[in-house]
Amino acid sequence: MAAADIGIVTLGTGAEGISVPSKTYVNMAAGLAIIAISPADSELNRIVQHYSIGHTVTPNEPAQIAKHIEALASNPTELAKLKARSREASLNFTSVNAKQYVEQIQLS
């Protein structure tokens, strides 16, 4: 993964409200720009957009996927920014952070 620049993360229709693929966090930790292929209202898309770490594409849009890959390949400065933000954003999704949420739930 360290040799890659872009991570592709897919999420099928129907799972958008209940799941974020674990490879999202692995790709972020590796400092990859993310292309998320999932329904528009998914948590996966919200993460990518909130942290500005890549691009989102709805399923069955291969031309859009190719467009984003080509755009990133032709703009190394933008790619480097996305990769740096992805790595930085990954620090918000650690086991230490998860422990805080569990403790908050237990106190409720």
Image: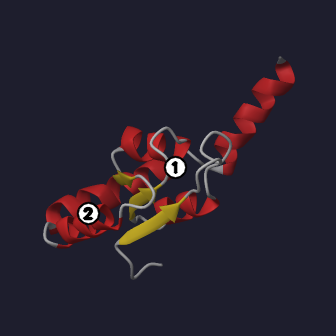
Location of residue 22 (image quadrant): bottom right
Farthest-out residue, right: 106
Discs 1/2, front: 2
Residue found 80% across the figure and 26% down from its top: 105
Identify the residue under disc 2.
Answer: 68
Local SS, label 2: helix
Figure check: 51 above or below 24: above
- Mark 1 secondary-structure assignment: loop
The residue nearer to you, when weighing 15 against 85, is 15
- Looking at this view, name the residue that lies furthest to the top: 108
Residue at image coords 45%, 67% = 8
Q: State which quarter of the image contains the C terminus.
A: top right
- The residues bearing labels 1 and 2 have C-alpha atoms spaced at a distance of 25 Å
Of the numbered discs in the image, which one, if any, rests on residue 91?
1
Q: Position of residue 92 (x, y in %)?
A: 53, 44
Q: Residues within 10 Å of mark 2 (few under 14, many from 20)?
A: some
* In the image: residue 86, left or right of residue 23: left
Give above or below for 2 relative to 78.
below
Q: Look at label 2 and name its amino acid.
A: His
Residue 44 image point, x, y percent: 52, 47
- The answer to whether 64 is drawn above or below residue 105 in the figure is below
